[in-house]
Image (tube, grey):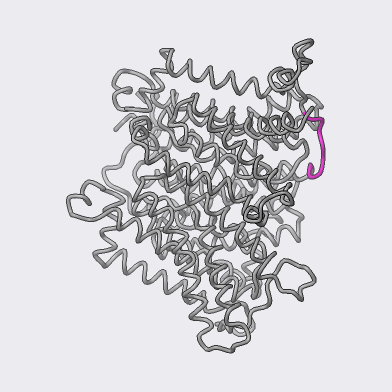
Amino acid sequence: MAWIVLEKRAEPSLAMTFLSPLVAIALTLASSAAIFAALGKDPLPAMHAYFVAPLVDPWSLQELVVKATPLVLIATGLSFCYLSNNWNIGAEGQYVMGGIFGGGAALALHQTGSALGLPAVIAMGALGGALLASIPALLRIRFSTNEILTSLMLVYVAELLLDWLVRGPWRDPRAMNFPQSVAFDVAVPILVEGSRIHVGAALAVLACCAAAFVLGRTMKGFEIRVIGQAPRAAAFAGFSPARATLLVFALSGALAGIAGALEVVGTMGQLRPSISPGYGFAAIIVAFLGRLHPFGILCAGLLLALSYLGGENAQIMMKIPLDATRVIQGLLLFFVLACDLLVLHRLRLARRGPA
Amino acid sequence: MDLATAILLTVVTASTPLLLAAVGELVVERSGVLNLGVEGMMIMGAACGFAATLATGSHAAGVGVAMLAGMAMAAIFGLLVLGLVANQVACGLALTILGLGLSGLVGQGMVGQRVDPVGPVDIPWLGSLPVVGKLVFGLDPFVYASFALVAGTWWFLSRTRAGLVLRAVGDNHASAHALGHDVRLVRFAALMFGGACAGLAGAYVALVYTPFWVTGMTAGRGWIALALVVFASWRPWRLLFGAYLFGAMSIGQLHLQAMRGALPDFLVLPGQFWSALPYAATIVVLVLISRSRGRRASEPAMLGTPFSPDR
């Protein structure tokens, strides 16, 4: 009887480093077709509505960039955390906190016509995200508290804080009791005439380039990668894991915060009780699908944005429930993680079972 | 039934799903695997258990299907983490995302539907005793099952040979492997137990706690269960204390919100603050626990460390 056995490669396969995400995407597409069929939909038109239709319409191509912007910003920050073995899974909360701080700045400057509006919004967003993210970092450094659970718990706290603000002190009194703030008047420059693509998209690309430079060309980037891959070597080299933890948490919090602030002030134009369709969690998938590399993240961000757009499109055209998007995103992450194996191992058919 | 008894009964119903899910995760972590997907397994248990009860009218079928659903989810996780040596933290997150999505698909036709809740056991004579009749002999079967699970888990881990092997695998998988134990088999069995417990906890939420379907109805309980395992320092009996402490707190904040008129001014806070309390308290408790000296010693040494037999 033939078995498939895993064989360790002598060294990581360069080809597989690039191919394994593509294999994962192919497997995800195949299983999405199966899911659509299981939901009683004709798989081919469903696949078309989900993965192709958004790419052939100019309006949705612009929306693709709008949705990819926060994903790429957040995932770029997260890659620093994951490369250094810091498990920040609360980016959703840091994004919300950035939205609160950035929205607060926009409220404070409302009807002042201040030219400082946009810088203030971005700076406050970054501050809000970084402050929230430094809580799990400091607790891990000082008390060695598990950062996975604390960063996640803070997501709920941030969401409830936002909920209270827009239903309470920050509610627009003229909004007929709707839980929403006033419409902000801070001008966020639009990059493409007639679209919703704002300056955040440029910032996301900039953040990717900066991250690629820092990780690939600077001592700090080297330090972060060594701490993640070889903690003992990092200790001998005199790198401080505590300082790195605080740095990567604050950095990823700041980027998530900027994403939240720009989403609220630029894309939505006001604060509402819910300001994210799960960007903070989807960005974790983006980070891994992009193999924790800035330019990989850029591509992966567009793909996850496609899953959001396709999900909406398939809901309208084919009545496929929105939850299918989550299933596809979850499967994608599974396949990405499974295919990572191909980088270090090869599959081989063997006559007998593994010893 | 007086008010105090009623409040205590709601505390029991709030604590039981936490206890059920946490006892499963405790065994998983004792074997050295960190499964962050408790929330995903739990919500799948809730959705599938509810659907099965809705279709068959049988609670037993619902509970069985819920446990199978939890185990199926855990099997996916096991395949990746044990078979393909994938990253455990990321796989756990994937399991949660997948579970939340799949449960939405399973539950799309059930929104607003209702099932008969599982009622309390009916013990003649004992059940009609004053106070203890309701509080000790008049609970639903899940509650007794959760106590039995805690006792059984303690007995298994500390008094049986198989439990010793499981702990050995969790504390030093290389040595356990060298002694001839099948590390991956032990861990897979532990994962199956964890999945069944999480599914059972989900069934409790959907069939007892709120017997109608709400999307995402487990509302972060899986994550609280994960925190409880740390809180309990990986010891079953402490889990009992932790789960009831959290249950009491989440019910307590509801009652405080309800009687805001009678409260002193400084306690009259917006509802969102009270709702955030269990999450904030979890962080505080995690900090207090990680400060204590005993924790490092009781944490399974191989927790979250990948193992492959050829290395």
Residue at x 65%, y 37% (from the top left corner): B44
Residue B206 vertical placement versus A299 (above, below): above
Instruction: Please name whichever residue, B75 or A260, is drawn nearer the observer in this view of the structure.
Output: A260
Across and down, in percent, residue B79 comes to 48, 34
Residue A347 vertical placement versus B71 (above, below): below
Q: Which residues are magenta?
A: B110-117
Q: Quadrant of the C terminus of chain B?
A: top left
Left or right for A139, reference A233? right
Left or right for B213, reference B308? right
Across and down, in percent, residue B149 comes to 57, 21
Q: Quadrant of the N terminus of chain B?
A: top right
> Predominant secondary structure in magenta?
loop
Q: Is residue B256 magenta?
A: no
Residue at x 74%, y 44% (from the top left corner): B214
Left or right for B172, reference A206? left
Instruction: Please name whichever residue, A336 or A148, is drawn nearer the observer in this view of the structure.
Output: A148
Furthest residue toward top:
B125
Instruction: Please name whichever residue, A269 or A167, is drawn nearer the observer in this view of the structure.
Output: A167
Residue B112 vertical placement versus A287 (above, below): above
Across and down, in percent, residue B295 comes to 37, 34
Across and down, in percent, residue A67 comes to 58, 67
